[in-house]
Every structure is written in structure tokens, then in C-alpha cells.
Image (spheres, helix red, strand yellow):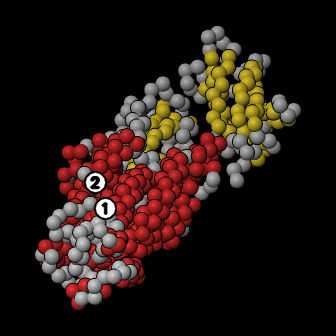
């Protein structure tokens, strides 16, 4: 029943509360820039990200206005930089709007995708259409997320049950519940790892579930960092299987009362080494492997995972042993419960310490706690952890009472009290038969002072029942913490979200493109002037202006003048002093002193005597800090 309750809690949280994972890297820039209009066709398209990325042959596609692919070769890293992706374009490209669609894998193993457009000559009315769904909003993405939960649960059960046997109660290794728990933990972790490895290729490329058995895709997935970590985990699990088999042979018959062999320091060292190695396979391919302070974040992540396993897996092990029933059952010794209480306290202390560091590393600021999805999820986790610690305090009280009840000093006091009460039976015969205080008295039960000699026999059982209830609640809350932790590993860290927002802000302020129609002075002929302002923020800016005819061709005008005015502050008009560059007009030293809404006035002289003035507004941003 306990296992069913825990599984039901996991499934409810998985199906009801876990959303799709967010991107962990972000696009910080591109060449050509999003929305830009180029006079000549580019030779290649380059994307720059906030962290290193990997990609497949089909990760970067450039589509023409007719939705035809114009990059014949796959993407490569530009100039050997791991945070870039570049594709070469075909020779002669027609004018119009081109769409760049991309899907890459960030350093922490999560796919990210997006799209942007640029135009050659002039924007076209048609352009390619690409999907804008979340990278994880697919059947493979959802299945991959569920399997990650299963893998974390298997690790917790395997590490926790093994630690309970090695540290707290060696005899537990021979009991059926613990042996089954070790088997379930190993099987869950192994099966989920195999499935994750098969799905790794489709997960990265947005493929179908059936493509999981594509050997070419599997071979490529194995060469990536996450795939290599999964392969290493499978090798370690094979070693764990051999070790568990050896332990099973040593413990055979222990559940029926046979003597359990002692586990030496070598067994503990091998077990600890395997647990650390398994935890490293997670840290190597997730959040700890990307971002700031990777050298410190990796061991912190390993300690966090191991502490989680020792605490949560040990709780479930203790719970199953406390609920164990059988004619030959002697119960969990109070000394074993006391040892687990100390181990769990240390594990929780490590969890809190490493969790505080990881929270600082991933969140970065107090504002991000409420302003990002990662921060809000982290607040929920902290609240549940506080609740767990409150419940654990009651578990420790029941443990202290149980240990006190079973302590030798308690037994000595009870025996002394019994002897004193028997000696107080005034007038009792002094025959030798009365010297054996363990035999029943001749008087009927309930007569005389001997009725009060023994303490209540149900105290220990009462303490065990109280401990069992508290451990059940603590284990269920621990499962909730585990689920939230898994959700956090699939959510974009707040610090990365801040970098993404900053990159988006820079991208937004990098190029300001204004397209303003005007009357060319001829009946039914409307021209267009396109103004490009870069970087579009306070300080020195470059201004370029191109005039198009009604049919979209380039127009040559005898004069073009551009001024900017900040009407709220009474600044301007500032003359950009555009110069004719034989096809377009440009100025490279326009200085804008203040951020805010500026009015752009453009005067176009179409003939020697005809001119027109049009206006548009543009937002100038402050210099980023």
C-alpha cells in the first residue's frame, strides 16, 4: 500500500503539474540580423548563442520566399567557436524575404529552437512558415520528461536502500523488502537509461518515437555529451548488478533467521564509489555542466544527488521495514533507527547547503525568484523542504523515545524497580522458592502489590507506530521534493533567462528598421523610404536610408534629409547629415543624448522642385549595463 501511494503521488504530480521544459541557452545574435534588409546577398548565415551548442545535419535551414532550402551543406561552428552555428548559402539568391529556422542542443542537453527572417533587396509578400511550438511539446519530448522522473526515482531507491544496509543495519540486506527495493531501483534506473538513450536522437531532432531505433541516429547520439553520459551510466549499472548479485548470495537465508555476514570497509568503499560515479553521469550532462563556476558546480551537484538518495531512498527503506509483518519478524532495532536518523540529518544538511549554492548559481537575484518560472518553482520546492524538516523533527522525537526505551540504562532501572517492589511485600515467606522473582506468585493475578511490577509493555509499539506515521508523511513529501527537483532540471535557470532577456533586449536595440511610405509626386505612385538606425541606443549611431519606387525597385533621389527630435524634452531637431553613397544615403556619426521616443522627420526631394516630408517615431534605448 505504501508503494502504491508513493507511485500514485508521483504520477499525479507528473501528469498534473509538470510542464514542458524550457530552453536553457538562447540566441544572442545573428548575421544577418533579424528583420534586416540587405542590398546584396550574403554568403552565409551565422548564429551566436549564450552558451556552447551542438547540432545535427538538419539543425539550421535557410528557406527562400518560395519555401525552398538554399543552404546545400549542414551547419558548422564558425571560427571554431562552440557557441556559434554557420551555414553557407547558394550562389545566386533572388530578392525577397528569407526564413532561418534552427534547432540546436544547449550545453546542458536540452534542445532549443527558433526562427527569424531577413530580406535581400526588398521584403517580399510571401515567406516560408516554420513551426513555433516548444521544443519539448512533442510525443518524444513528453516521454523523455517522464523517463527522467523514473531515472531519478530509481537512483534514489538504489542509493538509499544500499546506504541503509551499509551504514545503518547490515541485517536488512537479507530481508525481502530491501532486496526487492534494490532490484526495483536498479531495474527502474536501467530501463529508463536505455529508453533515454534510444530517444536521445529523436529528442534532439524533433523526430518521431519510431525513429528511436534508427541506428544512424543512435550512433550520433552516443557521440554527444548527454549520450556519452547515458552510456557510462549503463556500464556502471552493469557493475552494480554484479555487486548486488554477490550481496544477494551472501545474504541468502538471512530473512529466515540465518546469521548475516559482516560487511567490511571494502564493501562500503566500492558502494560509495559506484554511487558517486552514477551521480557524475547526471552532473556531467545537465545544469552543472553549463553556466558559471562549472568546476565547483559539478561536485556540488554530485553531493546534492547523493544526499537526496541517502535521505529519500533511506526513508522509503525504513518505512517498508517498519511496516513489515511476519511471524519471525523481530522489527527494526532501535540502534539502526538511531543510525539512520543521524545519517538522514547529515544528508539533509548537505541537501540544504548544496541547494543554497545551486539556487544562487541558477537564480542570480532576488527579483528572479518571482519573475521567472525557475524561481517560482524553486520557491515551491523550498516551502515543501521546510515542511519536510518540520515533519522530520517529529520523526526524530519518536526515534529518541524509542532509543531511550531500548537503552540499557532504561532496562537496569526497570529491573531495579521490580526488585524494590517485590522486597516491599511485607510478611512474605522467605522460602527459597520465593527468591526467584521471575516465577509467578502464588496469589491470584491482581492481588497484592506485585500487580505493579512491570512497566507498560506497549510503549515501544506506541513509539514505533508514531515513527511509522511520521516517516510515511516524510517519505511522501520527499517524493514531492524529488518531482519538483526533476521539474527544475528541465526548466530554464533564472540566470539563463536573464541572459536571454538581455540578449533579446540587445537584439531588439541592435537594429531599428523604419519603413515609411511617401507620395512620389506622380498620380497613384507611392514610394517607400527604409531607414536603418544602429545600434538604436544612446550614443553614436549609424543611419542608412534607402528609397524604393512603387514597384519595389531602388529609386534615385537628388536629396534626402533626416532629423530626429525629442519633443518631450525639447531636444532637436538633430540633423543626421546624410550623404549620398551611390544608391543609398548614410551617416555614421549621429549622436543621440537621451533615451525615449524620438520623432524621425524625413524630407525626400523627388525632382528639382518637388519634395515631401514624412514622419515616424522610434524608441531609443539606454546603453545596457
Residue 319: assigned label: 1
Q: How many marks?
A: 2
Q: Name the residue rendered at 56%, 55% in the picture.
A: 363
Q: Name the residue rendered at 28%, 88% in the picture.
A: 430
Upstream in sequence: badge 1 or badge 2:
2
Q: Give me the C-alpha separation between circle 1 and circle 2.
A: 8 Å
Q: Residue furthest right?
A: 570
Q: Residue furthest bottom?
A: 432
The kind of secondary structure element at disc 2 is helix
Q: Nearer the viewer, residue 196 or 100?
A: 196
Q: From this viewpoint, is residue 232 visible?
A: no
Residue 2: assigned label: 2
Residue 24, percent from left and from top: 47, 52
Residue 193, percent from left and from top: 26, 59
Residue 127, percent from left and from top: 44, 30
* Crowdedness near tag 1: few (<14), some (14–19) or many (≥20) residues, C-alpha within 10 Å: many
Q: Is residue 319 above or below residue 252?
A: above
Residue 304, percent from left and from top: 44, 66
Residue 492: assigned label: none
> Is there CB contact under 8 Å for labels 1 and 2?
yes
Occupied quadrant, residue 222: bottom left
Left or right, 233 with reference to 354: left
* Crowdedness near tag 2: few (<14), some (14–19) or many (≥20) residues, C-alpha within 10 Å: some
Left or right, 438 with reference to 529: left
Q: Name the residue rendered at 29%, 66% in the picture.
A: 446
Occupied quadrant, residue 471: bottom left
Occupied quadrant, residue 321: bottom left
Q: Is residue 14 above or below residue 78?
A: above
Amino acid at each position: 500500500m505504501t508503494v502504491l501511494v508513493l507511485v500514485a503521488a508521483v504520477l499525479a504530480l507528473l501528469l498534473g503539474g509538470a510542464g514542458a521544459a524550457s530552453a536553457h541557452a538562447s540566441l544572442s545574435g545573428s548575421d544577418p540580423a533579424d528583420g534586416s534588409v540587405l542590398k546584396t546577398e550574403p554568403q552565409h548565415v551565422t548564429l551566436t548563442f549564450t552558451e556552447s551548442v551542438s547540432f545535427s545535419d538538419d539543425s539550421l535551414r535557410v528557406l527562400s520566399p518560395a519555401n525552398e532550402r538554399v543552404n546545400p551543406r549542414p551547419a558548422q561552428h564558425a571560427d571554431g567557436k562552440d557557441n556559434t552555428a554557420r551555414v553557407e548559402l547558394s550562389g545566386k539568391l533572388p530578392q525577397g524575404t528569407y526564413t532561418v529556422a534552427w534547432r540546436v542542443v544547449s550545453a546542458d542537453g536540452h534542445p532549443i529552437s527558433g526562427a527569424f527572417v531577413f530580406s535581400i533587396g526588398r521584403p517580399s509578400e510571401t515567406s516560408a512558415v516554420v513551426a513555433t511550438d516548444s521544443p519539448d511539446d512533442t510525443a518524444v519530448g513528453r516521454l523523455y520528461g517522464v523517463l527522467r522522473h523514473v531515472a531519478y526515482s530509481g537512483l534514489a531507491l538504489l542509493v538509499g536502500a544500499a546506504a541503509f544496509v551499509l551504514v545503518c543495519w547490515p541485517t536488512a540486506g537479507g530481508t525481502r523488502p530491501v532486496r526487492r527495493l534494490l532490484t526495483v531501483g536498479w531495474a527502474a534506473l536501467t530501463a529508463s537509461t536505455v529508453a533515454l538513450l534510444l530517444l536521445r536522437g529523436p529528442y534532439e531532432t524533433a523526430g518521431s518515437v519510431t525513429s528511436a531505433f534508427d541506428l544512424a541516429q543512435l550512433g550520433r547520439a552516443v557521440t554527444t555529451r548527454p549520450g556519452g553520459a547515458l552510456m557510462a551510466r549503463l556500464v556502471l549499472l552493469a557493475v552494480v548488478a554484479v555487486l548486488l548479485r554477490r550481496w544477494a548470495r551472501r545474504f541468502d537465508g538471512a530473512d529466515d533467521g540465518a546469521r548475516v555476514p559482516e560487511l567490511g570497509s571494502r564493501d562500503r568503499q566500492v558502494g560509495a564509489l559506484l554511487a558517486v560515479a552514477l551521480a557524475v553521469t547526471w552532473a556531467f550532462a545537465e545544469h552543472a555542466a553549463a553556466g558559471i563556476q562549472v568546476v565547483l558546480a559539478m561536485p556540488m551537484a554530485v553531493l546534492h544527488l547523493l544526499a537526496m538518495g541517502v535521505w529519500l531512498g533511506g526513508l522509503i527503506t525504513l518505512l517498508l521495514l517498519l511496516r513489515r509483518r511476519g511471524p519471525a519478524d523481530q522489527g527494526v532495532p532501535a540502534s539502526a533507527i538511531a543510525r539512520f536518523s543521524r545519517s538522514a540529518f547529515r544528508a539533509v544538511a548537505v541537501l540544504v547547503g548544496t541547494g543554497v549554492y545551486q539556487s544562487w548559481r541558477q537564480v542570480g537575484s532576488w527579483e528572479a525568484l518571482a519573475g521567472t518560472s525557475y524561481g517560482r518553482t524553486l520557491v515551491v520546492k523550498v516551502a515543501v523542504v521546510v515542511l519536510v524538516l518540520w515533519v522530520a523533527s517529529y520523526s526524530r522525537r519518536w526515534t529518541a523515545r524509542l532509543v531511550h526505551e531500548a537503552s540499557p540504562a532504561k532496562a537496569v532501572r526497570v529491573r531495579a524497580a521490580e526488585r524494590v517492589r517485590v522486597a516491599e511485600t511485607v510478611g512474605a515467606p522467605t522460602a527459597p522458592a520465593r527468591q526467584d522473582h521471575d516465577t509467578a506468585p502464588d496469589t491470584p493475578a491482581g492481588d497484592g502489590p506485585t500487580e505493579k511490577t512491570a512497566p507498560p509493555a506497549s510503549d515501544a509499539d506506541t513509539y514505533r507506530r508514531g515513527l511509522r506515521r511520521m516517516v510515511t508523511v516524510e517519505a511522501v513529501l520527499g517524493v514531492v521534493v524529488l518531482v519538483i527537483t526533476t521539474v527544475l532540471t528541465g526548466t530554464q535557470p533564472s540566470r539563463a533567462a536573464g541572459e536571454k532577456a538581455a540578449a533579446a533586449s540587445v537584439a531588439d536595440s541592435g537594429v531599428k528598421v523604419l519603413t515609411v511610405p511617401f507620395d512620389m509626386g506622380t498620380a497613384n505612385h507611392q514610394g517607400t523610404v527604409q531607414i536603418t538606425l544602429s545600434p538604436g541606443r544612446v550614443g553614436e549611431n549609424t543611419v542608412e536610408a534607402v528609397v524604393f519606387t512603387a514597384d519595389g525597385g531602388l529609386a534615385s533621389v537628388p536629396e534626402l534629409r533626416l532629423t530626429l527630435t525629442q519633443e518631450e524634452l525639447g531636444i532637436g531637431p538633430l540633423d543626421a547629415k546624410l550623404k549620398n553613397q551611390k544608391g543609398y544615403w548614410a551617416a555614421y556619426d549621429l549622436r543621440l543624448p537621451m533615451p525615449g521616443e524620438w520623432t524621425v522627420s524625413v524630407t525626400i526631394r523627388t525632382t528639382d522642385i518637388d519634395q515631401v516630408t514624412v514622419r515616424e517615431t522610434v524608441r531609443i534605448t539606454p546603453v545596457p549595463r
